[in-house]
Image (tube, rainbow, N blue to C red):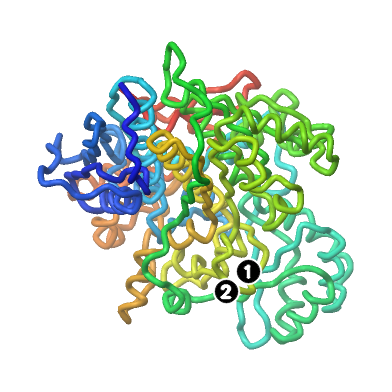
Amino acid sequence: MTSPALTQTVRPLDGLQLATSGPPESTGLAAGHLRLLGARTGQEPAAREDAGTARITVGGCGFSRQEAQVTWAAPGSGMIDEATVQAATGMMSVHGRREGEPRGLAADYAATATAVLTVQGLLAGLLWQARGGPTAQVSTSADRAGLLAVSQYLAAAGADEGEASELAAGGPPFTAAGGTLFELETLDPGAWAAFWRVLDAPPEAIRAGWRPFQFRYATACAPFPQALHATTLAHSWQRIRQAASMSGAEVCRLRTLAERATEQDGAAAPWTLVPHGPGHRVTGPPAAMPRPLAGLTVLEAGRRIQAPLAAHLLGLLGAEVIRIEPPGGDPLRGMPPTSSGVSARWLALNRGKKAEEVDIKAESDRRRLREMAAQADVFLHNWAPDKAARLGLDADDLAAVNPGLVYAHTSGWAGRLPNAPMGTDFMVQARTGVGEAVRPADESPAPSLMTLLDVLGGLLGTEAVLAGLLLRERTGQGVRVDSSLLGAADLLTAPALRRAAAGGDARRPGGFRRPLRTADGWIAAADACAAAARAHDLRELPTFEALTRLGEHGLTAAAVTTDLAGLHRDPRFAGCAISRDAHGAFAVPDPWSFA
């Protein structure tokens, strides 16, 4: 088909109509994003398939109707809601590592991720149409979203060697005298040591604490010495802030949801899209298009999780991803544990990508990178603020050599908050009230050591790039897109922030999504059944019998996955099988399918 281009198009879905069917909890967030992208609610509702399936359609203005079907999981899997998906996919196990036992996330993480993946699928399908491809129905499910969320931990669990740091209970946040909870962040072992020396921490505790602190992003726990917690308890918050200032480390007090709600303007989208001006489409549709982004090229200059995950998803959709790495290659390739000599976690985010070594400190290599960008469709990075401009690699610089480029920056704060701390996952969790949102009222607020925002921020980065590509296809103009961990935090906490803004109790009640112990494991009741399930004493029953007992009383529950290494054998995932890649590392299934 001819690309539906409108000179008056400002947003990628301007002129298109949106229809939904199914429960609002399955369609509301995705529909909200589609409306932010320009779609307007149509008159005809989408036909409903069945009680367990939600449907969203977008079409019109030259596009055939693009459909997405959304489910919790395959029928018969026992995954029927947020709690049971978290239990089965291993999310409860990973989130609970800090406490040493499974804990449910009090925020609806799987549903939120599923909504973003649904929008991705719809945008990819529309882009496929615009580039001359077929109309395909998109399917997404929360169980696949949950597997994607734990994919790095799953890959590590099946690696050839053990973890680089002990998997045991423990971790931040710290507590100052007077009860102030705070997060500490530094990527520099020297700053770590200097911070603790200012506070007179025992030298042996300082040495022993660095490794688990450094690897907490990878292991979701940090069993460092209790002497460090005792040290912060002996000092005021003012003194701790002084220690951070003197050492080069950063600290952030845990903000409440009520505080964050007062900062909300109620209209902030999780990303921004800004057209460059007159441009051109860099790449035409290839002769054969087996996947929506086939024939497009993405340059990715990312580190850690957020940008690499965004590019990984674009690769799964068919793009050729060329990873820009420093001379000698990405040092994280060797981060333990490894599979066939390559970091299992690195593979979870970067398998299938090509690599080019570029020294961005050298003008000759920056010139080469600009030449590569001139032939690309997307340039994606998560560099620190202002770094791209200092290097001559900002959106305006690359638009000069490629007016049709989609320039994407995934950041911590997107410049939205003044005096913000370092834009890392745990610091953003601390600053935005996520520490309250993910834990029920009977637990002390604490950011999850599972990298919630890095993953959700990566998903938003992919969504923003797809929106930018579709807008470029419709207007012929290049686009700058910005997404952030702050946007991810606000998206995840949106229901709690609405409760806080209305003066209600922002946090979920005590015991919410708390798994129940059985004789040989744990089970998690569906949210609607949790109160009734707690009335049963299941501690003497094997897990299978406990589930049967609850089922006899009309209560639905799921066994909690505690051994991620055995997840590939779990019959609940027979319809979305976990495989092994060429290095032997576990690989989760694509989060959407096109049929």
Label 2, residues with CA under 10 Å away: few <14, some 14-19, many ≥20: many
Q: Which residue is mark 1?
A: 173
Q: Residue 533 is drawn in which quadrant?
A: bottom left
When the figure is inspected, residue 589 is found, relative to residue 178, above or below; the finding is above
When the figure is inspected, residue 332 is found, relative to residue 375, above or below; the finding is below
Q: Nearer the viewer, residue 146 or 30?
A: 30
Q: Residue 215: where, in percent of width, then height?
A: 71, 51
Mark whose residue sits in front, 2 or 1:
2
Q: Residue 64: where, in percent of width, then height?
A: 23, 29
Q: Earlier in the sequence, mark 2 or mark 1?
A: 1
Q: Amino acid at mark 1?
A: Pro
Q: Residue 501: where, in percent of width, then height?
A: 35, 77
Q: Nearer the viewer, residue 181 or 475?
A: 475
Q: Residue 103 vs residue 35: left or right?
A: right
Q: Residue 238 — which label?
A: none
Q: Which residue is mark 2?
A: 254
Q: Residue 554 vs residue 492: left or right?
A: left
At mark 2, the secondary structure is loop
Looking at the image, which residue is at 41% across and 40% down?
A: 471
* Quadrant showing the N terminus: top left
The reply to whether residue 541 is in sight is: no
Looking at the image, which residue is at 34% across and 35% down?
A: 5
- Pointer 2 with pointer 1, Cβ within 8 A: yes
When the figure is inspected, residue 363 is found, relative to residue 249, above or below; the finding is above
Q: Nearer the viewer, residue 147 or 16?
A: 16
Q: Residue 482 vs residue 201: left or right?
A: left
* Quadrant showing the C terminus: top left
Q: Nearer the viewer, residue 80 or 590?
A: 590
Total labels: the figure holds 2
Q: Amino acid at mark 2?
A: Leu
Looking at the image, which residue is at 68% across and 86% down?
A: 177
Q: Residue 536 is drawn in which quadrant?
A: bottom left
